[in-house]
Image: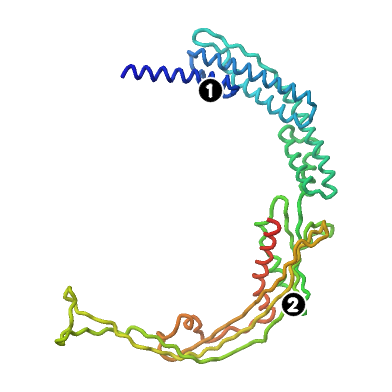
Amino acid sequence: MKNLIYLIGILIFTSSCTSVRKLVEQGKYDEAIVYSIKKVQGKKNKKKKYVVAIEKAFAKVTERDLNRIAFLKKRRKGAYWAEIYSISNKMKSRQNRIEPLLPLVSKDGYRAKFKFVRTEPIIIEAAENAAAYYYKNSNMLLRRAEKGNKDAARQAYNELKKISEYKSNYKDTKQLIAKAYSLGQELVLIDVVNRSQILLPKRFYREIKDINTSSLDSKWMKFFTKEDAVNTKYDFSIKLTIGEIDISPERETIREFEESKKIKDGFSYVYDSNGNVAKDSLGNDIKEDRFATVSAKVFELYRYKAANVRGNLIIKDINKRSVYKSVPINVDAVFESYASRFEGNRKALSKETIRRLRSHPESFPSNSELLLLAVDDLKNILLNELKSKFK
């Protein structure tokens, strides 16, 4: 048992040595540094292997980073300053992690040596040049955006947003961000036009335009239901044109009909051949349900009025001066009302007839009230087409 414990201890020790050494050999220098720091931090007797690992990994990763920075600077491309900024900040963070441990000495007296780099000048230079690069690039994109290129405006917006990572309140960045955002938006105007011979109520227009576009609104897409300013330049127009409206005359019919139903009406005993009440296996009297047929006469008044609304939903790309889609619209608005009374047994009535029982029918709606019944269907058609195009 003691031999087994000793063997496990040897394996664990060997594994820890191998793991930190492999990290360095595989070029995973920062992982090796973080791992080794955890092993020596706060400990009086620091193992040499970890002290050496920190020293070796730091020297190698610093050399690698400085070589990369020198290479990128020689390329003289503005886009590389962001990478230089990132590398130099990692160098600074790495040095800050090691500095509290200094002097780093192992329990057997080995003192690690570190050659720190002054990262501040590199960071300042990289931040200035990265901000300048994104600023210049975004201004080029904005010039294209001013000619109507929405994608360029959105790219400019993203480039300008990056500047704050390097410099705060850089030049007129805030104003340019607002400009890029404005130029990058697509504005959609929703309108309703009546070309029928029937006067529509004002509420009809309000109800249709009161469409919930919150599921469609996005950072770059905004919907409007009226022109808020004369100079507003919309990118798309959604026009619901009401072409024809047919309204039926008011119809009222009276009918009489009878309903009947077989219902349970008590029970009767079952008798055996001797005239006695029959018993089941438990000795209980055997009974059977008795049924009776009941009926009722129904007097029903039925009122009906309907409207049919036809037209087109046209989606236009204003910038391209073209019709993206034209959808025919056909919607029915139907008013129905029942009033019924009955004579006889209520149990004979069907559920549908019971539902219609009332002493007075509803009044016929006016033409305007009837047309408002079509609004929900029109709004659903409009919303579905918007989702199809813009979501």
Label 2 sits on residue: 244
Asked whether the beta carbons under mark 2 and mark 1 sit within 8 Å of each other, the answer is no
In this view, the residue farthest toward the top is 109
The x, y position of residue 191, in whole percent, is 76, 66
**Residue type highlighted by circle 2:** Glu
In the image, residue 389 sits, relative to residue 290, either above or below, namely above
Label 1 sits on residue: 35
What residue do we see at 75% from left, 79% from top? 198
In this view, the residue farthest toward the left is 274
The x, y position of residue 126, in whole percent, is 75, 27
Residue 238 is at least partly visible in this image = no
What residue do we see at 76% from left, 43% from top? 155
In the image, residue 198 sits, relative to residue 178, either above or below, namely below
Residue 200 is at least partly visible in this image = yes
**Residue type highlighted by circle 1:** Tyr
What residue do we see at 77% from left, 59% from top? 236
The x, y position of residue 331, in whole percent, is 67, 74
Quadrant in which the C terminus appears: bottom right
Q: Which of marks 2 and 1 is nearer the N terminus?
A: 1
Secondary structure of the residue carrying tag 2 is strand
Label 1 neighbourhood size at 10 Å, few (<14), some (14-19), many (20+)?
A: some
The x, y position of residue 36, in whole percent, is 53, 20
Taking the image as shown, residue 189 lies to the left or right of residue 266, namely right
Pick the front one: 365 or 315: 315
Taking the image as shown, residue 252 lies to the left or right of residue 188, namely left
